[in-house]
Image (spheres, coloured by chain):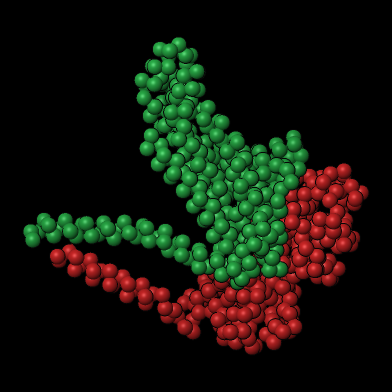
Amino acid sequence: MTKLDKNDRLIRISLLVVAFSAVSVLAVITIFIFEQGTPIMFKYGLKSFLFGQDWYPSEKSFGLLPMIVGSLMVTFGALIIGVPLGLASAIFLTEFSHRRLTRFLKPVIELLAGIPSVVYGFIGLMFLVPFIRENFGGPGLSVLAASIILGIMILPTVISIAIDSIRAVPDSYREGSIALGATKWQTVRMVVLPAARSGIVAGIILGMGRAIGETMAVIMVAGNAADIPGSILQPVRTLTSNIALEMGYASGEHREALFATGVILFIIIMILNTIANLTSARQKKR
Amino acid sequence: MNRLKITSVGVCLLVVFGFFSCRPNHRGTEIVVAGSTSVQPFADKWAELFMEKRPGIVVNVQGGGSSAGIQAVKTGAAHIGMSSRELKEDEKDLYEIEVAKDGLAIIVHPSNPLDNLTIDQVRSIFSGEITSWKTLNGRDKEITVVVREEGSGTRGAFQEMVMGKTRIAKRAIVEDSNGTVREIVSRDPNAIGFISLGLVNEKVKAIALNGVFPTEGAILKKEYRLVRPFLFLTKEEPKGLAKEFIDFVLSEEIQTLVHNEGLIPIRKGSGETND
């Protein structure tokens, strides 16, 4: 074997080790969360965890339903606000805006992703929460506040992926549509968007993943009451907030119950990722 | 191949050094203080000042909560335990030294016309039985109840001293620090919450309970009821370094600091005869 061959093998092996260490981190996290979280779920019964409505860890009552509902509500709210805004921006930036304007606006929007979440939370607490309290009533710390903040936070994800998939639509589609006498807007609506659909959907699901996993900003504006909110003006607690709020002092079964919260969050995020992968796989096939 | 050898030797050395540095090698010059997370931030500061005075000695302050601290002293895992609640009957075999007192203030927005509530009224508000200020002859507005998260010592003390067996309402807003509770109450005209007395400032109003305002005087005279002790616990009568540290905390210097940080100091000399 020549020296070069040896070096090659050495490099290959070390790269393999590095690659596996990244995967093994994921494996360790998964094993750890499940190992810590599942025993208590079976001890008190899966049903009482998933459908119990009372979260009083000091009284051994570990109902996670308010937090599951809370996470879903806030995420859904974020999509209602973020998706139309994001999609509209993406369409404008790709099809209607002046090229120079796009070159300026796109990096600015991407900058939104770089703002730390605690800053979003702080701004929400300072301006959005009092605004909601004074104009709509309730304590201001609410589903609505959390949804708006998260809706803004997922914009960069939704916009950049939507822009990429709209740009990926071949120009011949647009030319064909216009040659048939369609207006610009008709072309966008009936040709470009349907062709870019699966990419846009994948972007939305990624944004959804970001919304459901966000913690800091949500803790600051959501009010964190462990109760199923009766309206969007009432406070809400998400799964991630539940863990972050109480991890500091939790011990014994309380701590295990927070890991169980993590298990449920993990499963929800796995389901979302699988859906995202399936959609993009379907896009490739076409 | 040489390079590989050097790398592997390096890795081995790292592992070996890492292993040794993990072992505590200051036996006899280290005291472990563990327990209440309410006392911890203060104890951290006291430990720092103590270590400045006595170089070479390490005071290791750990959290974990009052119950964990009590357990740690019993098992010998810590030299001194910290508790922010009174000891229960079966824990009374420990030697306890009160190092400070902390008042719990019920706070509302400064614009709230109410100044006084009874303990029963406070309990009904936090349990969700009373939902409007109007019931208490206040404004016709819904009450925003703000509490601390499960597991927090402040919530535990409030639960014990005010709520008793009654549950805190599920729809209460939960925040994870005294500071955020104060922030939210200071911004919401209809809010009510509870925080450590030392952290009350001009942005919120501390209300009187059964007619008694939470002042240092009222607490020392035992007229204001929402007071919890900050206790240091040892297995037997403190001696050696542990005694030195406890005496230091009870010294005038530290007790003045305690006062400045908003806690109620133990009057001079009363600490040692407390037991």
Q: Please state if A161 lies on the left or on the right of B123 as rendered.
A: left
Q: Chain B is drawn in which colour?
A: red
Q: Can residue A170 be seen in this view?
A: yes
Q: Residue at x 42, y 80 (%)?
A: B25
Q: In the depicted view, which residue is nearer to us: B219 or A72? A: A72
Q: Can residue A116 be seen in this view?
A: no
Q: Which residue is drawn at 77% across and 69% down?
A: B160
Say if B98 sits above or below B117 in the image: below
Q: Which residue is drawn at 36% across and 25% down?
A: A170
Residue B21 location (% of width, % of height): 38, 74
Say if A154 sits above or below B83 in the image: above
Residue A19 location (% of width, % of height): 31, 56
In the picture as drawn, the residue positioned furthest to the front comes out as A286
Considering the image in quadrants, where does the N terminus of chain B appear?
A: bottom left
State which chain is coloured green.
Answer: A
Q: In the depicted view, which residue is nearer to us: B256 or B241? A: B241
The answer to which quarter of the image holds residue B212 is: bottom right
Residue A199 location (% of width, % of height): 44, 35
Q: Residue at x 52, y 56 (%)?
A: A266
